[in-house]
Image (spheres, grey):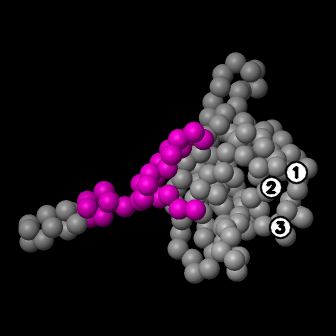
């Protein structure tokens, strides 16, 4: 019985250690090789554009259809609303990509910085950000949707 418990713990530890790790990511850093896919590269580019306030960089990564309903002005409005409610986005890190058949959702954590009402103390908060990617019939990867959870 003791041997069975030890084997179970060893197997669980091995699964934990060899899985795809979560990497805290600043825009200039690289994600670990195990989690480096074209879809995650596209997600990182989208998040970097969001943090740098690059409306063109953000919108250009959306599908052509989504670019019609979410343009540069919409990006600016949405980001300004985020600044007022959550603060300035400063970093992000990859969390997970749940398994789906055709689409690939990717969940990231975005970290925000803001000051208290007296503008004396700085504090941070985090929010989950989901990016859904997919490929067209030519194999091109696009961001199909995104939202804060």
The location of residue 20, given as percent across then percent down, is 41, 59
Closer to the chain start, of discs 3 and 2, is: 2
Q: Would residue 20 be found to the left or right of residue 127 on screen?
A: left
Alpha carbon of mark 3 to alpha carbon of mark 2: how far?
Answer: 9 Å
Closer to the chain start, of discs 2 and 1, is: 2
60 in magenta: no
Q: Name the residue nearer the viewer: 4 or 65.
A: 65
**Residue 78 makes an appearance in the image:** no
- Residue drawn at 67 percent across, 68 percent down: 141
Residue at the spot of label 1? 72
Marks 2 and 1 in Cβ contact (< 8 Å): yes
| The quarter of the displayed image where residue 131 is located | bottom right
The location of residue 88, given as percent across then percent down, is 72, 36
- Residue drawn at 77 percent across, 49 percent down: 57
The secondary structure type at the circle numbered 3 is: helix
Closer to the chain start, of discs 1 and 3, is: 3
Residue at the spot of label 3? 64
The secondary structure type at the circle numbered 2 is: helix
The secondary structure type at the circle numbered 1 is: helix
Q: Name the residue nearer the viewer: 149 or 57.
A: 57
Magenta residues, start to end: 12-38
Alpha carbon of mark 2 to alpha carbon of mark 1: how far?
Answer: 6 Å
From what the image shows, is residue 93 above or below residue 147? above
Alpha carbon of mark 1 to alpha carbon of mark 3: how far?
Answer: 13 Å
Neighbours of disc 2 within 10 Å: few (<14), some (14-19), many (20+): many
Residue at the spot of label 2? 59
37 in magenta: yes
**Residue 116 makes an appearance in the image:** yes
| The quarter of the displayed image where residue 104 is located | bottom right
Task: Say which quadrant the C terminus sits in.
Answer: bottom right
- Residue drawn at 65 percent across, 74 percent down: 139
Q: Would residue 110 be found to the left or right of residue 12 on screen?
A: right
């Amino acid at each position: 019985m003791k041997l069975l418990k030890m084997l179970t713990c060893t197997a669980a530890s091995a699964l934990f250690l060899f899985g795809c790790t979560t990497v805290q990511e600043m825009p200039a850093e690289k994600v670990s090789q195990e989690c480096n896919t074209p879809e995650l590269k596209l997600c990182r580019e989208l998040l970097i554009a969001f943090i740098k306030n690059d409306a063109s960089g953000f919108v250009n990564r959306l599908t052509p259809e989504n670019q019609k309903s979410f343009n540069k002005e919409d990006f600016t409005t949405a980001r300004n609303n985020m600044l007022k409610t959550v603060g300035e986005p400063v970093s992000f890190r990859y969390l997970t990509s749940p398994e789906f058949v055709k689409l690939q959702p990717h969940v990231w954590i975005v970290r925000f910085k803001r000051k208290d009402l007296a503008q004396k103390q700085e504090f941070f908060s985090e929010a989950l950000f989901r990016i859904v990617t997919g490929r067209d019939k030519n194999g091109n990867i696009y961001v199909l949707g995104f939202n804060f959870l």
